[in-house]
Amino acid sequence: MINLKVIKHRLFWLSLSGAMVIAALVCIASWGLKFGLDFTGGSLLELKFAGGQPTVSVIQNQLADISISSLTIQPAEESIILHFQESDENTHQAVKNALSLLPEAKKGLEEVRFEAIGPSIGQELRSKSFWLLFFVLIVIIIYIGFAFSRVSKPVASWKYGVVAIIALAHDVLITIGVFAVLGRFYGVEVNTSFVVAILTVLGYSVNDTIVVFDRTRENLPKSTSTFAETVNSSLNQTFVRSINTVITTLLALFAVLFFGGDSVRDFVLALIIGIFCGAYSSIFVASPLLVVWEKWQRRR
């Protein structure tokens, strides 16, 4: 069996995690997230040119006489995606008609999709997404507290739930921090699919954490070692399982990232970052925090 000294070096792992979380918070506070149409309102227009794709500068010049704001042009593999603030049908048709005059559109111009969302709907989606995340976290605390209700020594059952939530916050904040950087420097937007990815990460991360905690719960009654030694032994017993699970999951996600197309790329990227952080936190954050809390409790 693997014999990693995770608990022995817990201050190093917790300091590393703390540094990453602080860096993520600084990025979030400095730049925030680049909200997409789902949250701000506006239009998304995707067009395919039969005669080859025009350049971004050509499209910008062609649309210079049309009154549109916050125009973003994103070339895809076989199409061009345009984001702009206006969501009325007249602007939609004006943009499409102007681009149909380009030489690349002479052989045909296909509208792949058009999505329009009003600002009030976007604000409502943002509010509902926040409350949904809050509700999920509360349910997770209640579930873990119930699942570990028979564990009372040396750490109370509710503390398992609190530690799991701290580990989840670690995963979510780092993921959001990375997307704050991507939004600032690469224009990556956050939409409702990002919220779905975060919820998926929460489920994955808490599942991995519970596996380790559950092994600790099983080992405590029959262990003659200290609490720290028992936790470390439990980590080693579940380490290979956790690594194998995350590797197989990431392999599938990387395949989708590279071959799945632009429409799911940001969603999959959020999953990859979050699931990697979740695997890390279940081993190097949650259990070490539990031991730190237990030691602090004994000193009181």
Image: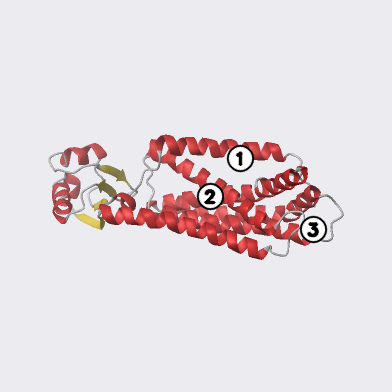
Position above or below: 295 against 117:
above
Label 2 or label 3, whichever comes before in sequence order? 3
Please name the residue shown 15% across and 39% down the image.
Answer: 64
Viewer-proximal residue, 288 or 248? 288
- x and y percent of residue 199 in the render? 49, 57
Disc number at residue 141? none
- x and y percent of residue 130 in the render? 42, 54
Residue tagged 3: 220
Are the residues tagged 2 and 1 within 8 Å (C-beta)?
no
**Which numbered mark, 2 or 3, is in the foreground of this view?**
3
> Image quadrant of residue 185?
top left
Please name the residue shown 71% across and 52% down the image.
Answer: 239
Q: Work out how far the residue at label 2 is from the one at label 1, CA to CA, in angstroms.
A: 14 Å
Q: Residues within 10 Å of mark 3 (few under 14, many from 20)?
A: some
Secondary structure beneath label 1: helix
Residue type at numbered disc 3: Leu
Label 1 or label 3, whichever comes before in sequence order? 1
Secondary structure beneath label 3: loop
**Which numbered mark, 1 or 3, is in the foreground of this view?**
3
> Image quadrant of residue 122?
bottom left
Residue tagged 1: 17
Please name the residue shown 43% across and 57% down the image.
Answer: 131
Residue type at numbered disc 2: Gly
Disc number at residue 274? 2
Position above or below: 207 against 27:
below
The C terminus is located in which quarter?
Answer: top right
**Which numbered mark, 2 or 1, is in the foreground of this view?**
1
Q: Is residue 211 left or right of residue 89?
A: right
Q: Residues within 10 Å of mark 2 (few under 14, many from 20)?
A: many
Viewer-proximal residue, 169 or 98? 169
